[in-house]
Amino acid sequence: MEISPMELFSEPSGWESARVSLLSAVAFFGLYAYFELLHNSGLASTLAIGIAAALPGVAEFLPKHRRRVAGALRVTAIGMLVALVLLSVSRLLT
């Protein structure tokens, strides 16, 4: 799989591209809220995944001329997910 900078910093494309990200973010926030409110055991990683899913969705709703901000939101989401993977691997190794 190849990620090109042109794809990360492309102009926002609206609801068609944002709906999957935003709906998955709502699902992760719902999971977090369910376990936190009813069982008092919500995981911070579920909340972080929800935020990381929401950032690209928000990036798609920005105006067309906000390519850099949209790209920064997408890169931030990828960085959050990579950090979660690294944190999980470090916990497994210790």
Image (cartoon, grey):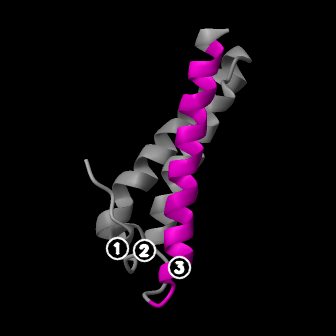
The secondary structure making up most of the magenta span is helix
Crowdedness of circle 2 by 10 Å Cα count: few (<14), some, many (20+)? some
Q: Quadrant of residue 44?
A: top right
**Residue at disc 3, secondary structure:** helix
Lower sequence index among marks 3 and 1: 1
Q: CA distance from mark 2 to mark 3?
A: 6 Å
**Residue at disc 1, secondary structure:** helix
The residue beneath circle 3 is 68
**Residue at disc 2, secondary structure:** loop
* View extreme (left): residue: 1
- Specify the amino acid type for callout 2: Phe
The residue beneath circle 2 is 9
Relative horizontal placement of residue 1, taking residue 74 as reference (left or right): left
Q: Residue at x 36, y 59 (%)?
A: 19
Nearer to us: label 3 or label 1: 1
The residue beneath circle 1 is 6
Kindly indicate whether the residue at mark 1 contacts the one at mark 2 (C-beta within 8 angstroms): yes
Q: Count of labels shown?
A: 3
Q: Residue at x 54, y 30 (%)?
A: 85
Look at the image and tell me in which quarter the C terminus lies. Answer: top right
- Specify the amino acid type for callout 3: Arg
Crowdedness of circle 1 by 10 Å Cα count: few (<14), some, many (20+)? few
Residues rendered magenta in the picture: 65-91
- Specify the amino acid type for callout 1: Met
